[in-house]
Amino acid sequence: MEGEHGGIAPGWLERAAGVLPDPVLLLDADLVIRYASERTREVLGWDPSELVGRGIAELAAPEDVPTVVGLVSSRMPVGEQALFRIRARHRDGRELRLGISAADRREDPEVGAIVLTLRDITRPGMLEEHIARARDFYLTLLDRFPSPMWRSTTPLGVDWVNQAYVGFTGRSVEEELGEGWAEIVHPDDLPDLLEVFARTFEDREPFVLEYRIRHRSGEYRWVVDHGEPIFGLEGEFLGHIGAFYDVHDRKRTEEILRTTVEELRADLASLAQVADERREAIARLLEDEDRRTRELADQIENDQLQALAALKLRVELLGEQLREDPVVQSLGPVMRSVEETMARMRRLMRELREEDAEGRP
């Protein structure tokens, strides 16, 4: 929306800037001023509309331009600020010393700009007050950030949470402060969480954690928490600021996929076992069938050979009884035929056994 002073700013941001005692500037990616609050008139002597369209470097003394351009144009993680001092000129020519706090909010859809707050620190002792007020202002901005955010100034003590945080947990701000936040962390995850918080606070390191926290619905939901160390103007460690993101649905999907894969693997293993058992059963059946076939063949061979042997014996006895009878002459071919049949039977059964032996593994 169109600001009533200089440039364009979201309505809520313009209202917040309007109640601050410090000037607020919004810069685009080229470090050109796109909005200036009314307070710039009091500190710099410029009408806000006169500043819109000017580069921020025009406000700094020549020797401080590299400082302004270098720090303001560098990208900063969410929740961090660049704090620095420069010399500037009032519109009437007076030299000023300004304390500047800068935060890159170009990727925040509700801001879309680099946010600067200015403080006249020409008089001694005003810098610390400016820093404190600037931090309060940025916490006001982050209070509307869509992701749950928190800040800690002691190893386990939280001193600030934003509206998205209490919206997620369903509890009051007061319940979350101090060590109250730990009350709704899943008991199984809390020991590791406390250890990481304490260690990274002591080592002044960032961290990324996955753990479960009780949602306002009463369900424990998985979140990924990113914590970043924050430092003061002189490099002193001030604590951590962090934001967490709900990944419960993703974790649940991963668990379903993992369980499904395990079940499929178990089913495949079971099917493979059944297949092996069936192969073994079929092999046994075939083996039994081969054995029964061989036994039957042996039985047939024996029966046939016995029948032929009996026939041969009867022919021989008949020949003895009718030795002098001319009909005996006709028994010779019969005897030879019986002997040849018996020989063929033995040869055939021998060949069948050899083929069966070659076909078996």
Image (cartoon, rainbow, N blue to C red):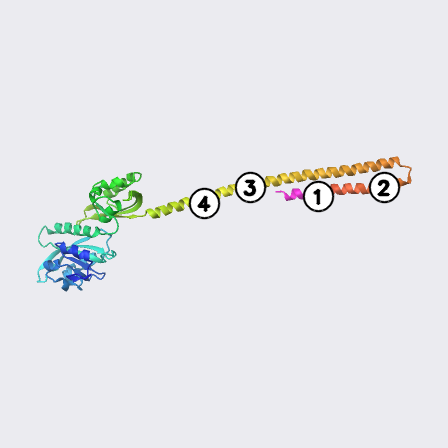
Check contact, mark 1 vs mark 4: CB within 8 A: no
Q: Is label 1 or label 2 in front? A: 2
Residue 270, magenta (yes or no):
no
* Earlier sequence position, callout 1 versus callout 2: 2
* Earlier sequence position, callout 4 versus callout 2: 4
* Residue topped by disc 3: 278
Q: Amino acid at mark 1?
A: Glu
* Earlier sequence position, callout 3 versus callout 1: 3
* Residue 264: numbered disc: 4
State the residue in front, 317 or 352.
317
Q: Residues within 10 Å of mark 4 (few under 14, many from 20)?
A: few
Q: Residue at x 65, y 44 (%)?
A: 358
- What secondary structure is found at the residue carrying circle 4? helix
* Residue topped by disc 2: 332
Q: Residue furthest front?
A: 217
Q: Position of residue 27 (x, y in %)?
A: 20, 60
Report the magenta residues as a range. Answer: 350-361
* Earlier sequence position, callout 3 versus callout 2: 3
Check contact, mark 3 vs mark 2: CB within 8 A: no
Residue 86 placement, left or right of 112: left
